[in-house]
Amino acid sequence: MKSCDRLTLEAVGESRDQGTSPDNHNSLSDTTPDPRATSIRPATTTTTTSPSTESPAKGTSSFGKRHNKTHTLCRRCGRRSFHVQKSTCANCGYPAAKTRKFNWSEKAKRRKTTGSGRMRHLKEVHRRFHNGFQVGTPKGARGPENH
């Protein structure tokens, strides 16, 4: 090792340990702080507002003031889904001609589809289909045939 390398290493070691030795009075606390690092900020004052000027609460106290109803009974589906201002049903889509249905709710389609109700008309149509849609009074109800 050259003598110049040893001198540079000793100089680096001294500069590294300069602020940590107990005998050394050139500690970090004695140095002047960088003015950009520690800026003196003015003390912030908090202003208190009176309860009368505060905005009203959005939570529990607001829910008690709801008197009006946005939805009423629908004439077509009978549910309380008819929006009064929009004049449309959220459930069946009334007054639209076609009933509201979506493929993303397969179970809802099953609940509303044909066969979930009484099917008063379709049961009769099914029975008449098997008999060939006969019209008129049945032969036995006409009485005896006279020639």
Image: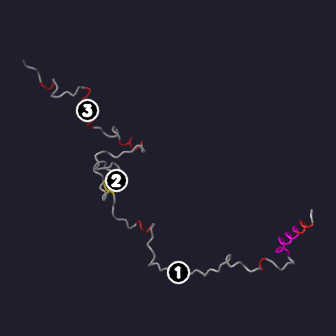
Q: Secondary structure at mark 2?
A: loop
Is residue 55 or residue 28 the one in the foreground? Answer: 28
Q: Residue at x 33, y 63 (%)?
A: 68
Q: What percent of the width, then of the height, locates residue 127?
A: 26, 29
Q: Residue at x 35, y 43 (%)?
A: 112
Q: Quadrant of the N terminus?
A: bottom right
Residue identifier under label 1: 47
In front: label 3 or label 1: 1
Is residue 145 or residue 37 the one in the foreground? Answer: 37
Q: Residue at x 92, y 64 (%)?
A: 2
Q: What amino acid does circle 2 point to?
A: Ser
Q: What percent of the width, then of the height, locates residue 37?
A: 68, 75
Graded by Cα atoms within 10 Å as few (under 14), some (14 to 19) or many (20 or more), the crowding at tag 2 reads some
78 up-or-down from 142: above or below: below
Residue identifier under label 2: 81
Residue identifier under label 3: 125
Q: Secondary structure at mark 1?
A: loop
For the residues labelled 2 and 1, the Cα–Cα distance comes to 47 Å
Marked residue nearer the N-terminal end (2 or 1): 1
Question: Overall secondary structure of the magenta stretch?
Answer: helix
